[in-house]
Amino acid sequence: MEHSPKYETLARKWKLGYITEETLRGYVELNDRKPGKGITAEEFEEITGIPYNTPEEPEEGEESTEEDSGDSVEGESSGEPENGETAAESAGDGLENMTVAELKEYAAERGISLSGLTRKADIIAAIRAAQ
């Protein structure tokens, strides 16, 4: 199987403990929105050893309950900031979970200039403004 361009980098970072499961899930979601820019659900499973299930795909033997069949997806914003988050922090794009180095790589891949930016919040703001 030929892997996505990000696969090797993300697999290495996962193995070293540099990224979380949530960050990898963000790359699957990114790939769904912009094919070739993230990793597939199958690659997520190869990297983590954890099945990738979206809320619409309960694990085999699991039944959907009223509690988990709502409009809101865990980790996804309902449009209203929660727990004192700003609207940008609740955007659900996974940028908050990336390191500064990952954000810079992400921006570079998309041709987003981060000239003079060093703070994570400023980098995230610049990426969001460019998207």
Image (cartoon, helix red, strand yellow):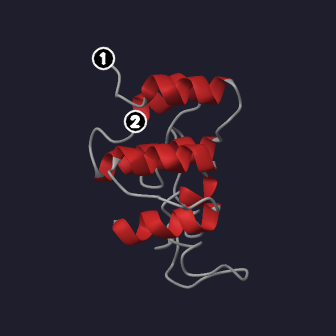
Q: Amino acid at mark 2?
A: Ile
Q: Is residue 89 left or right of residue 1?
A: right
What percent of the width, then of the height, locates residue 77? 52, 73
At label 2, counting other C-alpha atoms closer than 10 Å, the crowd grade (few under 14, some 14-19, many 20 or more) is many
What percent of the width, then of the height, locates residue 130? 35, 67
Residue shown at 53%/64% (left/top)? 124
What percent of the width, then of the height, locates residue 63? 53, 52
> Is residue 121 in view?
yes
* Image marks 2 and 1: residues in contact by CB distance under 8 Å: no
Residue nearest the observer in this picture, 68 or 127: 127
In the image, which disc is placed on residue 39?
Answer: 2
- Decide which of tag 2 and tag 1 comes sooner along the chain: 1
Quote the CA–CA distance across marks 2 and 1.
Answer: 11 Å
Residue shown at 50%/38% (left/top)? 52
Point out the image quarter for the N terminus: top left
Residue shown at 72%/83% (left/top)? 84
Residue for badge 1? 2
Residue 125 sits above or below residue 9 on the image: below
